[in-house]
Amino acid sequence: MQNIKGGYRSDIDGLRAVAVIAVILYHFKIGSISGGFVGVDIFFVISGYLITRIITEQWKEHQRVNLGDFYLRRVRRLLPALIVTIGASYITALFLFSPSDFKSMSGSAVYALAGIPNIFFWLESGYFDSSASIKPLLHTWSLGVEIQFYLIWPIVLLGILRKTTHITVTLLALIALGATSAVLFLKSDASGAFFLTPFRVHEFLLGGLVTFIERHKFNKLVSNAVYATGMILVAYAIFVFSSETTLFPGLAALVPAAGAALMILGGRNSTLAYPLSSWPAVKIGEISYSLYLVHWPVFVFTSYTLMGNVTPLHKLWLICCTLVLATALYYLVEKFFRHQQAALLSGPAFSLATALASIVLIIPAASSWTQNGWTWRIPAELREIGNIDERSASIYVFELIKSLNKAEGFDTSSEKEKILVIGDSQAGDLMNILNEDNYLSKFNVISRLVDSACGTPLLEKDKQDSFFKKINPITMKQPEYIKRCETGIARADDQKLLLEADKIFIAFYWRDFAEPYYLDAINKLASRTKAEIYIFGRKDLLKDSAFIATTLGRSAGLSHYAATYKSPETEKINAPLRLIRNVKYIDMMQATCPSADQCLVIDGNNKPVFFNATHLSKEGAKMYGPVTRRLLDEAMVSPSARMAGG
């Protein structure tokens, strides 16, 4: 039977175990836990319940709350283990990460130590956002949300307790307001709805609501029914939700949040809660915070070392390593500092020590963040490759194509051949390649920019609604893109321009989920224009130039070493593009990898070709020019309908 002595509830520790196991199995890609990310939402509900209960019980007993003591307990509970995790991750990244990756990690460390990592990851999200698999502190976004909730909610709750007796009604109103705001904001900024505290508060408040509802006594039958309903909702979210297709958080977040709230509400008196009150579940729940802190950095650093090739044997190692490190973190740090009587420091001294420890880490992290990931860490001959201004490089990708995108039509005063360029940032790279080689000057060129998130540069209007809402995982998760995609595709699919153009270049970051749609659209385009259509394949490797070069540690033999970073996905994606009838295919991988055992990632001055895994630097665009010119010239004189290259 669950232990509820002194207010402690073992079933809640068991629920913590469910949450952390779901998150870990989801991140490690073990089993059919497609919705394991909702474990974070379960944690939010538990936190809301416990914090609200602590405040209300103190208020009920003393008609006052010692906020200083409350905040000190939160600091003891969260910060020591968090600081150790951030410090260990920072030191590991210092020796393991390339300068560009270490720069990003350093920025996240600064924000995490300041208690606002969620804001960092929100600000960093965007077109050139790096993969989650190279962000060892990404999971701390949820701790930022918790910390911000802890700072605000006690003050708001005390105001409610003082001003009204209709607390349940007030909480219901706040929950409705928060949920509505989250749903509305999700349509305009999905990243903001995911990372920012105002759009997650209602999940905490669902837990807080339980504090007031549970004052009413329920018999065992009702408790079992409530608990069973909660279990079904939580299980449904964990096993049915998907990060690829579920629009989240929005209304979907209410499913696991409401489920967790119902399990807490019914768990005090439900026989169904016994499994989560068992010794194994409770022990996992006790170390759940340390498990959560440790698991993601362990996965990121392992995946980074293995270039993403994580096998089942590696996953077993990940689980063992996570358990060992989390247990050590729990007993040596988390548990040691949590209880004031067992700690060496108490009160203001402890808070000061925590602040000083954070500052000790913030100073070097801020330095490596502002100094491009400390390029001095790598051999002198490779330092230029790590000296990348990513902001300037990102602007360069789009600068030319955006200016060409503004034109309403071709220059009617020009007698040059007309080229219509359609695509995303890959078309931006293409324009830069041709411009750096002075190739564009021979033509009358305009562009039509279509966001990579759209999945396809062209799509029939009657298929768009179904594709964007049921097929494309990016627009399904971030519906704010849909209008932008519809507008971009409409401008690209301008019949007047298609008829006027002599040549149409289409370059895109082709994705497998959209393959039938863009293949069909391109085939149909060929029947609607007399222009020659040129399709440019993908050209990306698995990693950027700086990563590949710094991993090898020298420039000698680099091109041959880089060949090991060829992307199987790129070859798979390019294969059907080669086979489209009535178009000419340009194999851009011939520029990236001139031979089977050689790929080019630096130029003659040790400057990077790729500033990230898919986009070219200015030096890369210059280097690609001669090869791309040759491929185009060959294609233009070729009588064949297709030019596959090689």
Image (cartoon, helix red, strand yellow):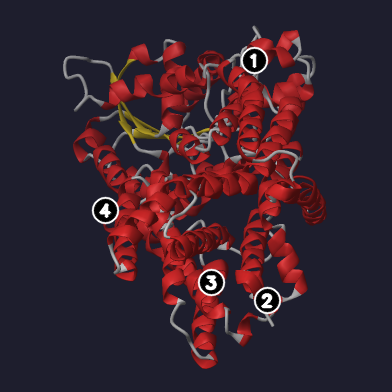
Per the image, the residue denoted by label 4 is 461
Question: Distance from label 1 to label 4 (Cα)?
Answer: 44 Å
Per the image, the residue denoted by label 2 is 3
Tell me which numbered mark, 1 or 4, is placed earlier along the sequence. 1
Q: Residues within 10 Å of mark 1 (few under 14, many from 20)?
A: many
The mark closer to the camera, 2 or 1, is 2
Residue closest to the eye, 433 or 636: 433
Evaluate whether residue 576 shows in this view: no
Residue 184 image label: none
> What percent of the width, then of the height, locates residue 344?
75, 40
Q: Secondary structure at mark 1?
A: helix
Per the image, the residue denoted by label 1 is 385
Q: Secondary structure at mark 2?
A: loop
Q: Residues within 10 Å of mark 4 (few under 14, many from 20)?
A: few
- Residue at 68% across, 65% down: 31
Tell me which numbered mark, 2 or 1, is placed earlier along the sequence. 2
Tell me which numbered mark, 4 or 3, is placed earlier along the sequence. 3
User: Is 477 on the left or on the right of 359, as rendered?
Assistant: left
Looking at the rendered structure, the kind of residue marked 1 is: Ile
Residue closest to the eye, 629 or 193: 193
The answer to whether 519 is drawn above or below residue 385 in the figure is below
Q: Secondary structure at mark 4?
A: helix
The answer to whether 97 is drawn above or below residue 575 in the figure is above
Residue 234 image label: 3
Looking at the rendered structure, the kind of residue marked 3 is: Val
